[in-house]
Image (cartoon, rainbow, N blue to C red):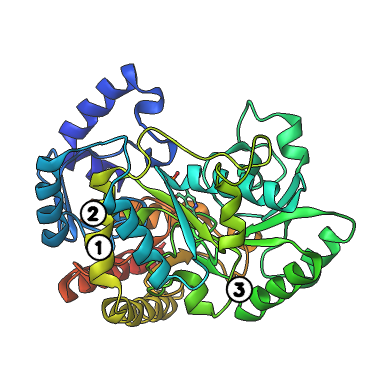
Amino acid sequence: MSDSYVSKTRESKDLYERANKFLPAGVSYAIRHFEPYPFYTARAKGSKLYDVDGNEYVDFWLGHTALILGHSPPAVVEAVKRQLENGTHYGTSHELEIQLAEQIVKMVPSAEMVRFTNSGTEANMYATRLARAYAGRSKIAKFEGGWHGGYDALHISVKYPFDIPESAGLTAGSLQDTIVLPFNDLEGVKEKLKNEEVASITIEPVLGAGGGIPAEKEFLKGLRELCDERSVLLIFDEVITGFRLAPGGGEQYYGVTPDIAVFGKILGGGFPIGAFCGRREIMKRLDTLLYERPHYSFHGGTFTANPISMTAGLATLKILKDGQLINKLNNVGGKIREKLKEIFEVNGVDVQVTGAGSLFNTHFTREEVKNAHAASKADKKKLINYHLSLITDGVFFLPAHTGALSTAHSEADIEKLFSETEKYAKQCKAT
Ligand SMILES: Cc1ncc(COP(=O)(O)O)c(C=O)c1O
């Protein structure tokens, strides 16, 4: 399989060798590396990526799940082209930031006020600081397998084995102040927090990097109640689920309202962005006119509310706001999960297909996958081989990562996913 990939990607191999001289691991983000080496994208349009060797891939990775309208959707491209002529970066206040904030407030139940950042990592970092400032507590909590970006306080217990630090350079202080909780296990959460005073609990409504594992509705409701009882702020990290599961994100999909919601990816319409929003009373702690140092919670940044990102975000939300396309994608997502499961089962391959809405992931295990711990016990090698087999035949998933759908995917694209999956499942059966 790897030989076949190598024979199709000669130019990429050369670029990878060149990249290795100047970019650590040859990449700009560790997860973009896969064995034997990543292909190099030359261009992208709609549901497809095209590499430097001229191979075409149906793209289910979609720029880290950000591209819900596919690559370079015409409405976004047109709006951005117009904005490019009016300035790429102001560093001053402008109306587009108000318009996008107003649009988010209309769509997201928990949002009364908004602040923009350049990435999901930054948005989570500032949301955590805000929660600490508001609650007057230092400790925070997050879940095992939860990925919220590389901010020290949240970069804990993301990958199996969960007790090993995720990176060198994390200080003891940042690790000590974060309590790690078991996902989809309310009793376990209560036990862990029994003797703790935390400012916030941060959760992804669907674990993304942790395996595309949805929270159970009752679990999220229980978490909400627990937070209310203990005066803890509930933070939904909706960087993946935002504007994907529903126009109002995971909170609307589940009917559970957090105190703070964090967005990224889709909100930028293909350009860098992040945002955090929440109840006015909480967000007011960011108001430097109301609070003096050290009582306000600082947030800022050179490129915050960049007019290109605001424009692309506005064009994207305009398309998504009535929920019709999202509902359609969610239906197709449900069918994909069922069909993938069926294909593997018919071929006698143990599999759990997880996901929600238009997100899906495959775990080669017989055991039910309700948390990242269970996902970590699945056969990772099989998953990587499955994805490499798909890539070699023109279907792109970043190996071992959650796949996503866009409105640009055609029936033929999805049929291709099924037929290539069947090919792999048959190979598995034969070996
Ligand atoms: C749920 C979640 N939160 C936060 C982040 C970090 O966002 P960014 O990569 O934009 O910093 C990610 C990125 O994958 C994510 O999936």
Please state if 248 lies on the left or on the right of 163 as rendered.
left
Say which element carries label 3. loop
For label 3, the crowd category at 10 Å Cα-Cα, with few meaning under 14, some 14 to 19 and many 20 or more, is few
Residue at numbered disc 3:
368
Please state if 249 lies on the left or on the right of 16 as rendered.
right
Please count the marks in the image.
3
Residue at numbered disc 1:
316
Query: Amino acid under label 1?
Result: Thr
> Which residue lies at the image location 49% right of the left edge and 65% below the top edge?
112
Of residues 352 and 290, which is closer to you in this image? 290
> Which residue lies at the image location 49% right of the left edge and 71% below the top edge?
250
Q: Check the image and report above or below for 378 versus 295.
A: below
Say which element carries label 2. helix
Of residues 249 and 425, which is closer to you in this image? 249
**Disc marking residue 312:** 2
Cα separation, mark 3 vs mark 2, equals: 39 Å
Give the quarter of the image for residue 245: bottom left
Please state if 62 lies on the left or on the right of 188 as rendered.
left
Q: Earlier in the sequence, mark 1 or mark 3?
A: 1
Say which element carries label 1. helix
> Which residue lies at the image location 76% right of the left edge and 42% below the top edge?
177
Check if mark 2's residue and mark 1's residue have beta carbons within 8 Å: yes
Query: Amino acid under label 2?
Result: Ala
